[in-house]
Each structure stands twice: as C-alpha cells, then as structure tokens.
Amino acid sequence: MCLDTLYKILYNEGHREGVLTPRLRRKKMKSVRQLTISALLIAMGIIIPMVMPRVTVPPASFTLASHVPVFIAMFFSPAMAVLVSLGTAFGFFLSSTPIIALRALSHVVFAVIGAIYLQKRPTTVLSQPKFQLFNVWIAILHSAVELVVVSVFFLMGNMPDTYYDQGYLYSVFLLMGIGGIIHSLVDYNIAYFLAKSLSKHFDIPVFKAAKKAEVTEDTKARLA
C-alpha cells in the first residue's frame, strides 16, 4: 500500500463527506499525513538498529543508517524532526540502555536546527557542494552533542570497562567524536538519496520549495 493511500484511509476514518469545509479538510489531511509519516519514521528509527549491519571498532560500534529516519524528517519540517527524534528516543528508553536513549534524545538539537535551516534555505538540497557543506556542519553538531552525553557517563564511571582501558582520548573523543562525524556524514547521504528519489513521487516540503525557488529564479533570469 502506497503512503498516499495509507494516510487517506486514516483521514477518512470516522469522517463523513461534507462535514468539513474544503479548507479544513485540506488542513486535516495535511496533519494526518504528517502524523502518518512521523509514525513510520519513528518505527523505522527503532527497528533499524535491530536489523542493520554494524561497523565495530572496539570498544565502539556504529549501526549503518541508524540516523536516517531523523535526517529524512528534517526534509519535512522542524516539528516532524522533533517528533521523530523524541519518538525514537522514547522507544529506546523502553527497550535499551539509558546512554543509548539519551544519545537518541540529543538528536533533537541538530534535527531542529538543521530542519529550520533547510526550511529557510531549501535550495541547499539542489547543490551537491552546498548540501555536503551543510552535511559536515550537521555532523559536527550531531557528534558534539552526543559527545557531551557520552562524556558525562564516562566521568560518572557508568561506561563498560573497555572504554576506561582505552582511555578517554581514544575511546570517547576519537571513536565517538570523530567516528560519530563520519557515521553522521554517511547516514545523511543515505537519507538525502532516499528523500531525493521519493520527492519525485511524493511531496517532500524542502524539495518542493527548492524546485519552486529554482523555477522562480529561472523565470527571473529569462525576464532580465
């Protein structure tokens, strides 16, 4: 079942035709669509770490595509980015260790900042150099916030012994910090590829706004 069909079914459930005005109907449809996509991304965010391959560099490990759902949400809106970040964090609070859950919760910081930036400058996604520069900036912010969380647990003595055997500089700063930047860069490129492909068939706000801005610029250039 395609995504459009799914959220149309959810929207029509319990509503009779003609009860809502066209404007309210469109607004309601948009809200249901956003909630449906958010729920799917949250589910993906919880499932991916369970099924995707991991790159292990003792004592750390990195799960491929674990950040992709949050990154995709950033192409929709700041609100969806926050919702998906909080949803996945809540899932990890129920099913995983506190440090993993708090690292997931820290994603709210880069997710909302990045989503706001993309909302204001959607044409970033049309240029590979601009997007990759944005990707690096987000990766540094992403890794820095997670590094704070991990450092607190390290200083409190709540990390596995292998981290202390290797020392803070290697096991936390180098592996979690620099390794986290590389992990973020890879995941955001995966998310970008998926979102760009999906934008050809579905309305993804940032890509839609970028294409509209591009058409406007082309029109102005022809009229100049």
Image: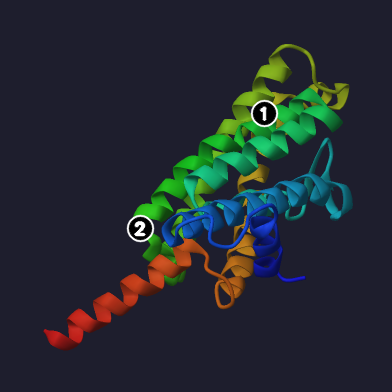
- The residue at 19%/83% (across/down) is 221
The tag on residue 169 is 1
Residue 140 on image: x %, y % = 52, 43
Q: Secondary structure at mark 1?
A: helix
Report the front residue among 122 and 39.
39
Report the front residue among 210 and 97.
210
Residue 72 on image: x %, y % = 60, 56
Colour scheme shown: rainbow
- Amino acid tagged 1: Leu
Q: Which residue is mark 2?
A: 121
- The residue at 60%/40% (across/down) is 83
Report the front residue among 57 and 86.
86
Q: How many angstroms separate mark 2 from mark 1 (CA)?
A: 37 Å
Q: Secondary structure at mark 2?
A: loop
- Amino acid tagged 2: Arg
The tag on residue 36 is none
117 horizontally vs 41: left or right: left
140 horizontally vs 3: left or right: left
